[in-house]
Image (cartoon, helix red, strand yellow):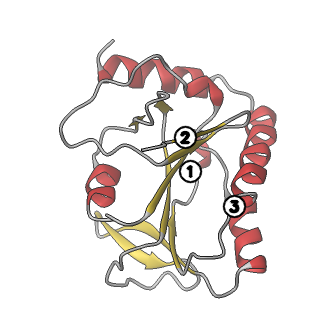
Amino acid sequence: MNKAELRSHLKNLRRNMPDTERSTLSQQICQRLAALDWADINTFHCYEPIAPLKEVDITAFIATIQKQYPKIQLYTSRRIDNVWKVVSWQDHNEVEAPHFDAVIVPMLGFDTSLHRIGYGGGYYDKFLAIQLHARKIGVCFDLGRVQQVPEEPHDVALDTIITESNIYKSYS
């Protein structure tokens, strides 16, 4: 299966997921995320979940981070004038993208070699490529696990992928 076919297949799987299931599984993923060690993180970039795309809803995790680690500076990316920009999570003001200590990315699917497949726009591959020292974490529902994600030279593997039932880590 090529990337376009795989993307289409994974979108259909998620599209058929009931909202109640998405909510329950998202809570389980948030609990796994919160159990990671965040003490050494100062700057942190995460995505804002898009409900119609049935992405993992990490808003409960973000609330936990803000409460337990108030020193962490949170950022996200937003489309401003049709261009993706990094903004402060709190006030949504555009900032010069710092080098982050951790980045959480959404994805449609993944393999156990920690390769992800996203929506095909390439934003996160470009973004992760310049975040050399960041802990790169992906979140995905188990239904997104595939045998192999077709790799391209620009693809950036993750350090950790968290699902509702497992935490996959690189050991290199």
Where is residue 144 shown, x and y percent of the image? 55, 27
Residue 20 or residue 135, whichever sits in front: 135
Camera-near label (3 vs 2) is 3
Res 17 → quadrant: top right
Tell me which amino acid carries mark 2: Leu
Element on which disc 1 rests: loop
* Residue position marked by numbered label 1 in the rendering: 50
**How many labels were placed on the picture?**
3
Position above or below: 1 against 88: above
| Callouts 1 and 2 close, C-beta under 8 Å | yes
**Residue in the picture at 18% in, 38% down:** 153
Residue furthest left in the image: 153
**Residue in the picture at 69% in, 35% down:** 166
| Callouts 3 and 1 close, C-beta under 8 Å | no
* Residue position marked by numbered label 3 in the rendering: 59
Res 155 → quadrant: top left
Where is residue 93 shown, x and y percent of the image? 44, 85
Tell me which amino acid carries mark 3: Thr
The crowding category of the residue bearing disc 1, from other C-alpha atoms within 10 Å (few below 14, some 14 to 19, many at least 20), is: few
Residue 12 or residue 99, whichever sits in front: 99
Position above or below: 79 against 5: below
Res 59 → quadrant: bottom right
Q: Earlier in the sequence, mark 3 or mark 1?
A: 1
Position above or below: 48 against 161: below
**Residue in the picture at 48% in, 40% down:** 107
Element on which disc 2 rests: helix
